[in-house]
Image (cartoon, rainbow, N blue to C red):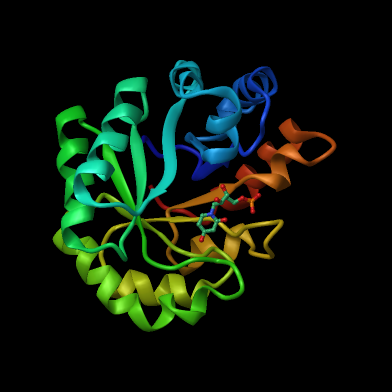
Amino acid sequence: MQKQNGLIFAADLKERRKTLNLTRKISDYIDAVKVNYPLVLSTGAEIISDLSDITDVIADFKLADVPHINSRISKIAFNKGASAVICHAFTGEESLKSCTKTASEFDGEVYSVVNMSHPGSEDVMDSSLPKLCEISKKADIDGVIAPGNQPDKIEMIKNKIDTKILSPGIGAQGGKGKKAISAGADYIIVGRSIYDSTDPVKSAKKIRDNIKMYYSN
Ligand code: 3DU
């Protein structure tokens, strides 16, 4: 993923045509589109190939399975045209390594989830944060997912692991792009504040413009 805008579009829609049209229209303002279960289960895995003709695709299946299954799912995503997959770190080093090993066969990337943005994520994930960063480091991941609505956590993670940080939780979940980037995020991930807005193209541009001066390449 080449950094030009610092913005990743979370395409959590259910309609193929709408997703492709919108991604095409905002492609100048984003560096990648992130697909998750709502889109892929509604439209089929081919949507990954279709979107990969427009921009980089991050397959966010939050893989949290035994190594060979993590590897198989990653392989399918990369074969369809994904540039990156997202995996949970809590399943341990071997599961995460199965993703990074598979990614290396495709020149792809792996991002691991070390913390989350929703209320309740602190129940388990906060106390495990140092360990999740350590596991991610050992598995040689390309970056981590960290909560954009909690800049203090971004800073904490940045101090623990020197890697790219992708931060969701911006806009609809209360986070501010500028704050997340200033705290150390390299990219922000935004869904509803783009696709649910009355003018999604204008919103994407505005979100991109708002963070542009805060990030360094
Ligand atoms: O809240 P939004 O509509 O901007 O969507 C956020 C996206 O980021 C969505 O795809 C969700 O699965 C993902 N995500 C989080 O929101 C929070 C996390 O901690 C990890 C991923």
Q: Quadrant of residue 71?
A: top left
Q: Nearer the viewer, residue 67 or 85?
A: 67
- Vertical relation: 54 (above or below) 202: above
At 64% from the left and 62% from the top, the residue drawn is: 176
**Residue 16 located left or right of residue 94:** right
At 52% from the left and 23% from the top, the residue drawn is: 44
Q: Quadrant of residue 96?
A: bottom left
- How many marks can you see? 0
State the quadrant of the N terminus: top left
Picture coordinates of residue 189, whole percent (x, y):
54, 49
At 47% from the left and 18% from the top, the residue drawn is: 46
Q: Quadrant of residue 115?
A: bottom left
Q: Nearer the viewer, residue 93 or 198?
A: 93
At 20% from the left and 49% from the top, the residue drawn is: 67
- Vertical relation: 13 (above or below) 170: above
Picture coordinates of residue 128, whole percent (x, y):
34, 78
- Vertical relation: 17 (above or below) 38: above
**Residue 106 located left or right of residue 82:** left
**Residue 197 located left or right of residue 130:** right
**Residue 160 located left or right of residue 199:** left
- Vertical relation: 106 (above or below) 54: below
Q: Residue furthest bottom?
A: 127
